[in-house]
Amino acid sequence: MTSGQTKALRKVLIVDDDPTHLEIYGLLLRHAGYEPVSALVKFAGAEIPKDESIGLVLLDYRLQSLRTSTEFAQEIRALMPDAPIVVLSDVWSLPADIAPYVTDFVRKGQPARLLQMVGKLLGPAAERAGAQASAIIPGAAA
């Protein structure tokens, strides 16, 4: 694998309707060695990057948009069939309507668990990710 391929696999697309969440999770991922790419969901939808080499997608479930997260998951799956999609949301468990299109689920507010999941799906950066989560966000626990 070339360094360009490694870098591409470290790109994480974050799809959320809250700019603060995009910033927080982008910072967390960047500090752990990943390259975050943000897609801000607005009421009319969001532009999902088509020319990015995305290794993983983090998708919020509750979106203030005309389009549902399930519709976004279907679009992302069509554009990036090999990229794992992880629902990152404040819901308590993975909703049934989106389950067929995603790989896994992590609740917001669990940065160490999120970095473990990203590391499990993308590779070795997770070895140091758990320790970094508590350095970035005080009180973060796995």
Image: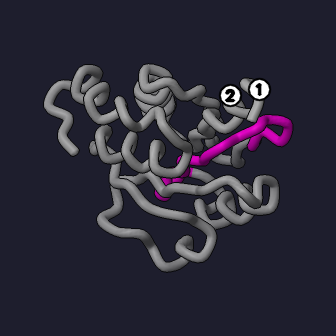
**Residue that lies at the very extreme toward the left in this rendered image:** 139
Q: Position of residue 54 (x, y in %)?
A: 70, 40
Identify residue type, mark 2.
Answer: Lys
Neighbour tally class for label 2: few under 14, some 14-19, many 20 plus, Cα within 10 Å: some
The one nearer the camera, 43 or 22, is 22
Q: Residue at x 44, y 22 (%)?
A: 27
Q: Position of residue 68 (x, y in %)?
A: 61, 62
Disc sitting over residue 7 in the figure: 2
**40 relative to 76, above or below:** above
Amino acid on which the number 1 mark rests in the picture? Gly
Q: Which residue is under mark 1?
A: 4
Type of colouring: one colour
Q: Position of residue 115 (x, y in %)?
A: 39, 40
Please tell me the numbered disc located at residue 18: none
Residue at image location 25% in from the left, 26% down from the top: 137
Left or right position of 73 against 26: right
Give the left or right position of residue 81, taking residue 101 as reference: right
Res 75 visible:
no
Query: Seen from this angle, which residue lies furthest front?
Result: 1
Q: Using residue 89 as the reference point, say whether residue 132 is left or right of it.
A: left
- Report helix, strand or loop for mark 1: helix
Judged by its main secondary structure, the magenta piece is loop
Which span of residues is magenta-colored?
Answer: 48-64
Residue at the (78%, 35%) spot, across then down: 52
Find out whether residue 5 is within the magenta segment.
Answer: no
